[in-house]
Amino acid sequence: MMNWLTGSKHAEARKLVNQLKDASKRERARAELLRMGAEAAPALIEALQTTDLNLLPYYQAVLARLGVAATPALIYSLLNAHPLIRGRVAEVLAHTKDANAVPALLSALRGEFYTVRGRAARALGAIGDQQTVRPLLEALKDPELEVRTEAVKAVGKFKNPETFDNMADLLLEDPQIEVRQAAAMALSETRHPQAVPYLVLALRDPFWWYEREGAAELLLKAIEGLGTLAVEALLEALTDSEGTVRRYAARLLGQIHDPSAIQPLGLALYDTHFEVGRVAAESLARFGPQGLKVLAETLHHPEAWLRQHAIAGLTLSGDKRIIPVILDMLKDPDREVQKQAIQSLGILKDSRAVPILQAIAIDRRDREMSALARESIHTITAA
């Protein structure tokens, strides 16, 4: 009798799962499946083998809503089903966070299929059971990129400084940039002061930025995420022997926006590396009147490249009160400073600049200046 009843319920559940494909029936089918509770789980797990990735989230969402009622069926499938289903089951367990699934997830973490190992690591991180830290640290050595990535994210969720050295092994030594990026974000998300030295050490490693500056953006985001915790280390990095490191430090100090960085950034304007000075000027512009005062004073410096930086920084402030100052810089004796002033007037889009720019545009003896002036005029009048 029980076998017949179970079979009947399973057939009903499969029918309801099939209705999830129909947008007009989906809400009612979802409600009925949730009402069935644990009896709906096997049919939903069967559906996880779908090749339609648009439907997969619906099946997983209902299983997740079933919560602990679905755990026995999910555990069985995690240990016995096709690898495709096992991985998708682990994703569900990451949402339900049922600690009863921990033994099965630890078994999956040591299993044959790397996709399952990676998703098991993700689920263990979501559940947050302390007994899983050691196995997750072992998973940091997994030969597969996906597993190391998910394992370091999971370890980071425990926010335990005793694990930071292990996480830093990936941050500083992993051959795959994707794994290093995951380690950087995992350390950042701990929001722990002891994570700072590791991330700033990574900033000094050319693996992150030599011929792959796009990859470094995630590292910069990770350091920025630590906020004022990172300021002291970044001020030190602002004097690093490598120009790229100084440039990144200047940029981050502007983004973190701690007032203690204003004076050091003012000194960084004089950096012999052109890009460092430029970024320092851009960062100072983020500090409002205090930063703008430093930039305005630099407009009178005898070095042309410093005056150029100052104009660029002032322009980024967007403050229209600087228009007369920028217009005055059109008379600067240095050509590059004049060019920067013309471009800045276009960026600021203030109509007061048009008559003066027109005078430059008309004089075609200097074709480059004329073209720059015409481009700025077009930008202003099109605004």
Image: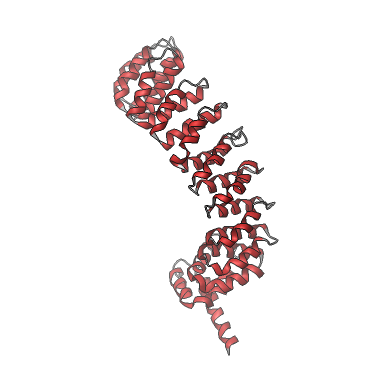
Left/right of residue 277 with respect to residue 376 in the rendered view: right
Q: Would you say residue 209 is visible in this rendering?
A: yes
In the image as oriented, which residue stretches furthest toward the front? 162
How many numbered dots are placed on residues in this image? 0
Q: Is residue 241 above or below residue 129?
A: above
* Residue 232 located left or right of residue 45: left
Q: Quadrant where the C terminus lies?
A: top left
* Front one among 288 and 29: 288
Name the spot of residue 110 as percent of width and height, x first: 68, 61
Whole-percent x, y for residue 258 in the image:
40, 35
Which residue shows up at 63% across the image and 45% down it? 169
Q: Quadrant of residue 241?
A: top right
Residue drawn at the location 39% of the way across and 23% of the way down: 344
Residue drawn at the location 50% of the way across and 29% of the way down:
238
In the displayed orientation, state which residue is furthest to the bottom: 1
How far across and how far down the image is residue 245, in percent?
Answer: 54, 30
Residue 256's x, y, as percent? 43, 37
User: Which residue is at the front of the view, 54 or 89?
Assistant: 89
> Which residue is nearer to you in this view: 148 or 374?
148
Residue 345 visible in the snapshot:
no
Q: Residue at x 70, y 51 (%)?
A: 143
What colour scheme was applied to this rendering of the protein? Answer: secondary structure
Give the answer, above or below, for where 360 lies relative to 243. above
Quarter holding the N terminus is bottom right
Above or below, 95 relative to 342: below
Q: Quadrant of residue 78?
A: bottom right
